[in-house]
Image (spheres, rainbow, N blue to C red):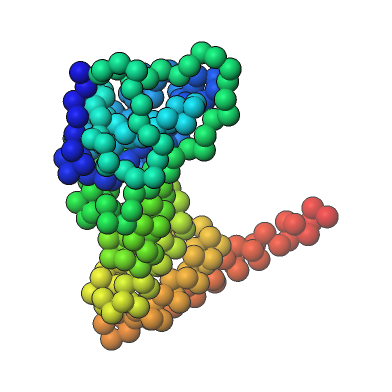
Amino acid sequence: MPTTYEPAEVPGWPAYAFVVRDSGRVAVSGPLLPAAEHPTRASAVDAVAAAAAGLGRPVRAEATERDGTVWHLVISPDGAVGELSVGARQGKASRKRTAPGRARRPDSGQARSAPEPVTAAPVAGAVTPEALSEAVARLDGYAAAGRAEEAETLAAQLDEHAANALGLSHPDALLVREARARITGRAGDAVGGVLLYRDVAERWHYRGAYEQAEAVADHAQALWLEIADPATAVAAGVSVVRMRNQIPGEGGSAFAAAVAHQARLEAARDAAAGALGPHRAGAR
């Protein structure tokens, strides 16, 4: 018989959704997991179990059958499937059973239209600082292991999830976005990382958290300095100079440094364009 969990035993975040398609394939979605369809229920459970293993604890999931039946599940890191006690979630179709301890299998009769996927985003109160810290640590682990592109994709999902649940300028959401900026830079998108850092720095500044704003602005400026192509750096520099106009650093030193670097970049860009001019003219 499957293990039954009380709602208090399993955090509300992250939560995953299984949706059984008419074809029998199972769509899986949820935080820190690329949306995908799996050929079997077992492979779908394995995907969520891998996410649970990354967190080191069981996670919640909802499985929607083709007839609309919803199962409230708990997936453990070892792939074991338990159940969340009745009443853990409201407003869903009633949970059905065909035999004790066994999940109901989809019927083999006439195919029905698949229901819309159940959203995996929990209410704001379920997005705890601890859960977000776990998720960020996992993303940093991906990046450190050379899985930068995967980490970047999942960081964007986590950022959107935290912003939707908490608000764009909530302190915990800003910490997630800062992590996304860091991972984006590691993945090779320095401009994207600079823009994300700038957004976080300005939001901290608007909140009156000046130390946090200055620290994140420093990260933005440091990443900007790593951009080698002058034209690309000039484009990113517009945002950095704007940011430093609001967060100028001690005595305005950071703002002055940003303006000076932007001027050097513009000169280098213009010089490169001038050097290419005669060649282009000769080619005509």
Residue 182 location (% of width, % of height): 34, 54
**Closer to the camera in the image, 39 or 232:** 39
Tell me: 76 left or right of 120: left
Tell me: 42 left or right of 5: right
The residue under the point 45% across, 35% down is 35
214 up-or-down from 195: above or below: below
Which quarter of the rendering shows the N terminus?
Answer: top left
**Closer to the camera in the image, 199 or 190:** 199
Q: Which image quadrant for residue 214?
A: bottom left
222 up-or-down from 99: above or below: below
Residue 186 location (% of width, % of height): 36, 48
The residue under the point 35% across, 68% down is 169
Tell me: 62 left or right of 172: right
The residue under the point 71% across, 62% down is 277
Can the viewer see residue 212? Answer: yes
67 up-or-down from 198: above or below: above
Q: Which image quadrant for residue 70?
A: top left
- Counting labels gives 0
**Closer to the camera in the image, 155 or 140:** 155
Residue 148 location (% of width, % of height): 37, 41
**Closer to the camera in the image, 51 or 70:** 70
The residue under the point 40% across, 67% down is 198
Q: Which residue lies furthest to the left in this view?
A: 9
